[in-house]
Image (cartoon, helix red, strand yellow):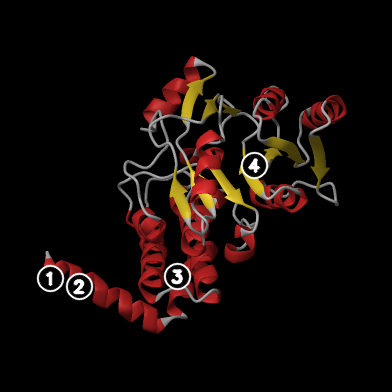
Amino acid sequence: MKVSVVIPVYNAEQFVRSAVVSALDQFETAEVILAEDNSNDDSLNVCRSLEAEYSRVLLVCHPDGKNHGAGATRNLGVRNATMEYVAFLDADDLYLTDRFRVAEEFFVRYENIDGVYEAIGVFFEDKEAENKWISYGEDDITTLSERVCPEKLFDVLMKGGKGTFHLDGLTVKKGIFEKCGFFFENLKLHQDTAMNFQMAQFGRLYPGRLDTPVALRRVHSGNRFVSDYNRYLTSSLMWKTLFKWALKNKVQNNRMTAIFLNHLYFIYCNVIDRHSEKRINIQELWKLILEPLKHPILFIRVLIEHFRRKISC
């Protein structure tokens, strides 16, 4: 098994070397793709040094030399990957020993497999980051609480309550992107969450190690925490984007309804949010509100489903 490890890089001069070394330490890593996103710090020069130092490291940049965000940068890395298997690692995170051992066993065992997701852990760079992490109620391990068969993974993720998986713990066949599409480039946040749904819908993802981390997420004061943003707005944009994707790809009615319901829910949250310092402006809000009105049949279906659940309770 030979893997292309894609590392999107943005303002990670302090950490990217450690990430690269942890990836190169894996026997299965055939190449590390450093996708540099026009950082403001010295990341580009660090990446150039790593490419010169290690024959398995390839540095790629956006052709126009501009900053395009995490989604576009991951896509750049994937498109430059030459191996059959692709894995991801954030530039400030680390792989642990035997990162791909169980994943390889699963790819051998199942003929129709598209990917394997596994747990990742966390370590804190400083006390400030640890306190911030704890204050947001984040878990020390990102994983699913139970093993889910590929056919039910989308519905389990959609329903929530049983955890999720992180890109650092995901290994997939490169061909899965032909089935589900690439990362959404219009989203500043949540491209990774959206990709989980994309892959769960059109791919067959199996659970690997769910109780033992295969990678560590580094938490430091420079991390972008979701709570630092208007979470209702960023979530609304993700569900709106997923909904358009689902329409285009003719996702099943029950899943389309679930996506649409989440879209409506976060629009509602934006409307009633009176306390956020990052309030959505009226123009953005109207764009969100008008979108569901273009789909009256789905809107009625959601209302029927909502009242059906209330009656059954």
Screen quadrant of the N terminus: top right
The one of 179 and 229 positioned closer to us in this rendering: 179
For marks 3 and 2, the one nearer the N-term is: 3
Tag 4: residue type? Met
Label 3: element kind: helix
Name the disc covering residue 307, or none: 2
- In the shown orientation, is residue 42 left or right of residue 310? right
Q: Which residue is mark 1?
A: 311
Residue sitting at x 54%, y 43%: 170
Tag 3: residue type? Ile
Q: Position of residue 87 (x, y in %)?
A: 62, 42
Name the disc covering residue 1, or none: 4
Residue sitting at x 37%, y 50%: 274
The one of 42 and 50 positioned closer to us in this rendering: 50
Q: CA distance from mark 4 to mark 1?
A: 52 Å
- In the shown orientation, is residue 72 left or right of residue 254? right
Residue 201 in view here: yes
Select label 4 or label 1 by which is in front.
4
Q: Which residue is mark 3?
A: 289
How dense is the environment of label 2, judged by Cα within 10 Å: few (below 14), some, or many (20 and up)?
Answer: few
How dense is the environment of label 1, judged by Cα within 10 Å: few (below 14), some, or many (20 and up)?
Answer: few
